[in-house]
Image (spheres, rainbow, N blue to C red):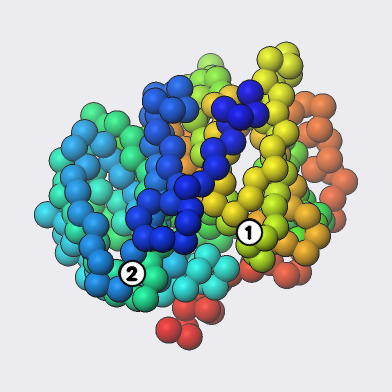
Amino acid sequence: MTDSLLIKPIDTNANGTFASVTAEQAGWDYLNMDAFRLSKGQTRSGQTNGYEQVWVLLGGQCRFRSDKMDFGEIGRRPNVFSGMPWAVYLSRNSTYEIEALSDTLEIATCWVVTEEDHPARLVTPTDCPIEIRGGGTASRQINGILPPGFPCQRLVCVEVYTPPGHWSSYPPHKHDVHRVDENGKVLEVDLEEIYFYKIEPSDGFAYQRVYTTDGIVDSLMMARHHDAVLVPEGYHPVASPPGYTTYYLNFLAGSAQSLANVDDPQLAWVKESWGAPDPRLPLVHLGMENDS
C-alpha cells in the first residue's frame, strides 16, 4: 500500500514536468496533476478539453494568456517559502499559453473532469485567505487558493505551511463518505486528495500516515521534496521534523466542492489540550508582496 500512495518525482533539475499523478495511476475518478519548470522565454500551451483546471505558481513570474482572458504578467514569489500564491483557473474547452518571464518558473497544475462552465479567474495573493489552524505544536498556516465556495464545479486547492517540529492535518481527519443531516447540511464529503510536498531546506523530509479504522489501509510514508502522497480514503496526519519547514499543496475533488470532514474520534480530544498558535505564524503573508 505504501508504494501505491507515495509518488516519487522525476526531477533532474531540468525543464519540463518533474512530478506527475494521473487519475488512472491513482485508481480514482477525478484528480490529475503535474508540476513543471520552464526557463525564461520558454512556453507551454494546451487545451483544457473536458476538464476544469488550476495552475498554481510555485515560484517565478509568467505571462498567462487564454482564449477566455489575457491574465497578463503574474507572479512574484521566487519560491513557496517567500510569499503568497498566484493562480489561474480555467473551465473546460479553454486554450492557454504560459510564457516564463523569470529565469526559472515552477508551476503545479491540477485538472478534473467537469460538466459545468465557470468564468476564468485570476487568483492573486489578496484573494487568498490565511487561516492559522490548531494550536501549540499542532498549529499551522493554510492559504486558500480555490477554497470551498470558489466558483467552479469540483476543484478545491489550498497550500499548508507546517513549522519545524509541528504536526498538521491534526487531529487526523477523513473525508471519504458523503453524509448530510436531516436538513441537508453536508457533514462529510467523499474527496480524493493529493499532497504535493516541498521541504525547506530541501534535503529534509516529513512523515505522513494514511489509515482507516478497520486497518485495511495503514501506511506510514516519508515524504521528501517534490514527493506526492495520495489520499483516496482514511485519516491522514502529517509530522514536520525539527529544523525543517514542511509545505504541501493540496488538490481535492469529489462529491461536493467542500472540505467537510470528521476527526478520528480516538484523537479528537487533543483539540482541548493545545495552547495558543505558534507566534511564528504566518510564515508567509501579504507584507512580503509589498517588496515587489
Vertical position of residue 281 compared to residue 25: above or below = below
Asked whether, in this view, residue 143 is left or right of residue 199, the answer is: left
Residue at 44% from the left image edge and 28% from the top image edge: 25
Q: How many marks?
A: 2
Asked whether, in this view, residue 105 is left or right of residue 79, the answer is: left
x, y percentage for residue 210?
67, 30
x, y percentage for residue 216?
68, 15
| Quadrant hosting residue 213 | top right
Question: Which of disc 2 and disc 1 is earlier in sequence?
Answer: 2
Image marks 1 and 2: residues in contact by CB distance under 8 Å: no
How would you rate the neighbour count of disc 1 (Cα within 10 Å): few for under 14, some for 14-19, many for 20 or more?
A: many
Image quadrant occupied by the C terminus: bottom left
| Residue toward you, 10 or 122 | 10
Q: Is mark 1 on a helix, strand or loop?
A: strand
Asked whether, in this view, residue 171 is left or right of residue 83, the answer is: right
Residue at 19% from the left image edge and 49% from the top image edge: 46
The residue pinned by badge 1 equals 199
Vertical position of residue 288 compared to residue 221: above or below = below
How would you rate the neighbour count of disc 2 (Cα within 10 Å): few for under 14, some for 14-19, many for 20 or more?
A: some
The residue pinned by badge 2 equals 39
| Quadrant hosting residue 139 | bottom right
Label 1 amino acid? Ile
x, y percentage for residue 74?
31, 70
Residue at 65% from the left image edge and 45% from the top image edge: 223
